[in-house]
Amino acid sequence: QVLLVESGGGSVQAGGSLRLSCVASGFTFSRNWMAWFRQAPGKEREGVAAIFTETSGTAHADSVKGRFTISQDKTKSTVYLQINNLKPGDTAMYYCAAASVGRTGLALRAELYNYWGQGTQVTVSS
């Protein structure tokens, strides 16, 4: 059974930083994509960053480039999202997602991913 568990969210003031973590169990980091998505109330889920576990190649949404960085630690089966210079517009539930080996699609589109975590809330106050 695949389980993705996110942590690291919280309430911070604008300009602050957070590092989100996603620990995967029952899932081998191989040639597959893992990603972070976010969803604010009343808005669609948005892919913000993705990483290809074999090469550590990454993709980041234009809206977060320069502030968000995705990384991985294969030895810990963990994917991270470093978020700097937080803005109130970053307030959302952040979800970790994983795609099984062999699945294809756009890295920042939800359709690629078949495993999802429960999410961690990030709230940014001005």
Image (cartoon, helix red, strand yellow):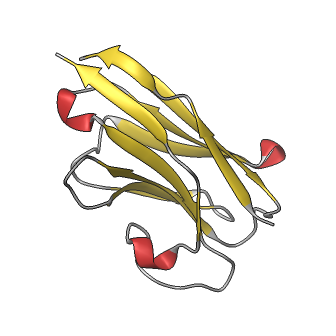
Q: Is residue 77 above or below residue 59?
A: above
Q: Determine the residue positioned at 21% across, 48% down.
A: 63
Closest to the observer: 58 or 19?
A: 19
Quadrant of the image occupied by residue 110: bottom left
Q: Determine the residue positioned at 38% across, 72% down.
A: 109
Image coords of residue 108 (percent x, y): 39, 66
**Relative horizontal placement of residue 87, taking residue 9 as reference (left or right):** left
Q: Which quarter of the image is occupied by the C terminus?
A: top left
**Relative horizontal placement of residue 84, taking residue 50 as reference (left or right):** left
**Residue 84: in sight, yes or no?**
yes
Q: Is residue 62 above or below residue 113?
A: above
Q: Is residue 87 above or below residue 37?
A: above
Q: Is residue 86 above or below residue 102?
A: above
Quadrant of the image occupied by residue 37: bottom left
Q: Which quarter of the image is occupied by the N terminus?
A: bottom right
**Residue 17: in sight, yes or no?**
no
